[in-house]
Structures are given as structure tokens and as C-alpha cells.
């Protein structure tokens, strides 16, 4: 188990009791210390339970917003990938016209952001941001490059596993999710407090895409598949099908 | 069939490249300004947070990243009784949801003022969601 200077465990043991919930005050992720809320939650107002969208910003999609490799004059460096999946609710129903926004580091592990001072090269052909709306089957898809791992200073020799940030607006107001998609078999999983803040190993595995030969495009790009499941809305009665 | 929900993860420090590519903090053309600061449990400004508000009366969304002093600013309808606000930040592993009652907001230079505190005795009331 990785240990910080103050002997705070960076990664806590698995705990299936957490289910899909993160541990907000995760000691190994230092920034949670003064930012994790620690007061009891209030009951969600009734009128928000089944309040429907509209989806934020759905009218602002542009050309190549879903192809991060074609937003500049040249091709970005790195391993070209396609990431596809479906946005579903807990009953398995597709969520249509969900807004999916993504952002990520480039292949060298550097974000196109002024705060990122990691001494890895920026890529003039890669901004690392995209957005799309899901189709009638809840499907989304992006073409991008596989992001690199990068150091982040949380503790000694701290490195984030490669990941793509995802933000999703579903059909209901409460179907809001920001999360991160990881790549299968990453050796950094065991050392990352953000990934392990999801303490239930089954829930944590839902953050990991699977390599998908069906989605892999010959002579062009590796395919990864990752489905996203949003809550059905508080106190909603499941619909009998 | 019940599928397992996808867990949340922090928005991280670099969300602006994906979420703040254009100003989206004006819900109406002519309205009242809603300003505030996002503060941590030590009353320090959170300069890498993002606030999303929804006015259910006008059915409009707005989004604003916090600045170096933790400040956010929106232009909202004058007659909105309240707006819902989602809060995201580096160090916050899951978004939080609150309701800003505009009648409770302080007046400040013609704007409405509402600070959001993530932690502590004066923590903002967040909803279970």
C-alpha cells in the first residue's frame, strides 16, 4: 500500500458497503480535506425529483466536436482511439439527447491548460475537448488519442492513471454526472486515491472501459467501449415494461 | 433489470478546457446579477470550481467557473424566486446540489450575493441526490 509522508494511507482497503458512492473525505486525496462537505444532507425538494431538462447547451454543438483528432490543421501525436458507448438509466433504458462533454490530457500527459506545468510537450494539433449528444439508442462516440499518465503532486511520486473526463446531462435535472473513464489494466490503479475513492471494487470497475475489437477500426484506431448509467431520478416508480 | 450506477469522480483542476469554452453565465439578456464566492472549510476561496445554475421558471441553464478569488457571476431573471445550483471542484469527488433562495440573498451593489461554503459550521445546505 502506498503511504504518504505523514503516514496517511494513500489508498484505503476495498469496502463494498459504499456501493456506487464515493468517499467524499478520502484522506489519500489531500484536496478533499477542506472541500468535502461534512454536514447532513437535506431532502431533495419534491418538485426536483422528476423535473425534466432541457439539456444544457444542446444547441451549441460544432463540427468536429466529437472528433478531437480533427480540430486543428494536422493530426495529433499518439495512439488514435475511438471511445463509444451508451448512456442508460438504471432500468436499462437509453437516454436520448444526453449532452456528453469530454476533456483530457494529450498523448504525452499534458493538458492544454495554463495551470498544467507538467514538463511534457503540448501538441499544437490537440486541444483535448469534445462534446456530442446521444442518439436514439443512447449512443455516443468520440475519436481521440489515448491520454498519457501524468504526475500530480498529491503525494510523493503520485501519477494519475490515464483517463478521460466525462460530463453528462441526462433527461432529468437530477441525472447529472461528472466522472472519469479509465483504460483497462492500468498499472497505476492500485496507487491512485481518486480512482480508489470509489471503495466498492465492483462499482470501481464500472469506471474502466473495455477494449473492443468490434469497435476497432482496421488500419486506423483502437476501439474502447464504455457505458454510462445514470440514476432513475429520486423516488421515481420504475416503469413496468 | 437494474443496472449499477456509474460512480462520480472529481471534475479535477483542468475542467475549463472542456466545460468553460465559452461564456455561458447569462441566462437572460436583461436581468439581475447573482454573484458569490465558493469557499472551502477554512474560508479560503476555491479558485478551481464550477457552478451550474438552473432556473426552473425560465428553464434555462448557466455555467460559470470560479476565478482566483473563488467568485462566480450570473445574469438571471429578475422574478426568479430561486435557482438550483450544482457545485463541482477539484477535491470534490461528487457534485453537490443546493437551492439559492433569491429572497434570502444579500444585496450588493445592485446584485444579489450568495456565497457557497463546502464544509464546516456554516456549510451550505446540500441536497441528497
Image (spheres, rainbow, N blue to C red):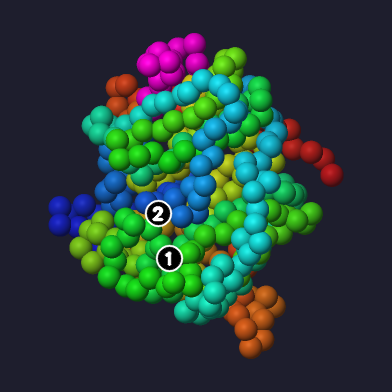
Q: Are marks 2 and 1 in contact (CB under 8 Å)?
A: yes
Query: Is B110 contained in the magenta span?
Result: yes
Q: Position of residue A34 (x, y in %)?
A: 28, 38
Viewer-side residue, A90 vs A50: A50
Q: Which residue is pictured at 29% across the width and 66% down the height?
A: A118
Judged left or right of residue A208, residue B116 is left
Q: Position of residue B76 (x, y in %)?
A: 55, 25
Q: Which residue is pictured at 49% across the width and 30% down the height?
A: B74
Judged left or right of residue B74, residue B67 is left
Q: Is residue A69 above or below residue B24?
A: below
The residue tagged 1 is A105
Q: Quadrant of the C terminus of chain B?
A: top right
Q: Secondary structure at mark 2?
A: loop
Residue placed farthest to the top in the image?
B103
The residue tagged 2 is B14
Query: Is A155 contained in the magenta span?
Result: no
Q: Which residue is pictured at 59% across the width and 79% down the height?
A: A222
Callout 2: chain: B
Q: Secondary structure at mark 1?
A: loop
Q: Position of residue A165 (x, y in %)?
A: 49, 57
Q: Which residue is pictured at 34% across the width and 67% down the height?
A: A150
Q: Is residue A81 above or below residue A33?
A: below
Magenta span of residues: B101-116
Q: Is residue A15 above or below residue B43?
A: below
Residue placed farthest to the right in the image?
A241
Asked whether the residues under marks 2 and 1 belong to the same chain, the reply is no
Viewer-side residue, B4 vs A38: A38
Crowd rating for badge 2 (residues with CA inside 10 Å; few <14, some 14–19, many 20+): many
Amino acid at each position: 500500500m502506498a503511504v504518504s509522508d505523514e503516514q496517511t494511507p494513500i489508498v484505503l482497503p476495498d469496502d463494498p458497503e459504499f456501493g456506487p458512492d464515493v468517499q467524499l473525505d478520502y484522506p489519500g486525496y489531500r484536496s478533499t480535506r477542506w472541500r468535502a462537505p461534512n454536514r447532513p444532507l437535506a431532502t431533495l425538494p419534491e418538485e426536483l425529483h422528476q423535473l425534466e431538462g432541457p439539456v444544457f447547451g444542446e444547441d451549441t454543438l460544432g463540427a468536429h466536436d466529437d472528433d478531437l483528432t480533427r480540430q486543428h490543421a494536422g493530426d495529433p501525436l499518439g495512439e488514435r482511439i475511438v471511445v463509444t458507448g451508451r448512456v442508460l438509466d438504471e432500468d436499462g433504458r437509453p437516454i436520448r439527447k444526453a449532452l456528453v462533454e469530454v476533456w483530457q490530457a494529450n498523448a504525452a500527459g499534458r493538458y492544454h491548460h495554463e495551470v498544467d506545468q507538467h514538463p511534457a510537450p503540448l501538441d499544437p494539433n490537440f486541444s483535448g475537448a469534445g462534446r456530442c449528444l446521444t442518439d436514439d439508442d443512447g449512443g455516443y462516440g468520440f475519436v481521440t488519442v489515448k491520454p498519457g499518465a501524468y504526475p500530480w503532486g498529491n503525494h510523493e511520486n503520485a501519477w494519475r492513471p490515464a483517463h478521460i473526463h466525462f460530463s453528462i446531462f441526462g433527461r432529468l435535472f437530477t441525472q447529472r454526472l461528472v466522472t472519469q473513464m479509465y483504460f483497462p489494466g492500468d498499472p497505476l490503479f492500485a496507487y491512485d486515491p481518486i480512482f480508489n475513492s470509489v471503495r466498492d471494487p465492483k462499482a470501481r470497475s464500472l469506471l474502466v472501459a473495455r477494449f473492443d475489437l468490434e469497435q476497432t477500426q482496421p488500419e486506423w484506431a483502437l476501439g474502447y467501449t464504455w457505458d454510462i448509467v445514470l440514476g432513475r431520478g429520486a423516488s421515481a416508480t420504475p416503469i413496468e415494461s | 433489470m437494474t443496472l449499477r450506477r456509474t460512480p462520480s469522480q472529481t471534475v479535477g483542476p483542468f475542467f475549463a478546457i472542456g466545460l468553460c469554452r465559452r461564456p455561458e453565465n447569462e441566462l437572460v439578456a436583461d436581468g439581475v446579477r447573482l454573484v458569490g464566492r465558493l469557499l472551502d472549510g477554512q474560508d479560503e476561496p476555491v479558485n478551481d470550481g464550477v457552478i451550474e445554475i438552473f432556473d426552473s421558471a425560465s428553464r434555462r441553464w448557466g455555467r460559470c467557473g470560479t476565478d482566483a478569488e473563488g467568485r462566480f457571476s450570473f445574469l438571471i431573471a429578475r422574478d426568479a424566486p430561486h435557482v438550483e445550483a450544482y457545485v463541482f471542484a477539484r477535491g470534490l469527488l461528487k457534485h453537490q446540489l443546493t437551492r439559492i433562495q433569491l429572497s434570502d440573498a444579500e444585496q450588493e451593489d445592485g446584485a444579489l450575493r450568495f456565497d457557497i461554503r463546502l464544509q464546516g459550521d456554516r456549510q451550505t445546505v446540500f441536497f441528497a441526490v
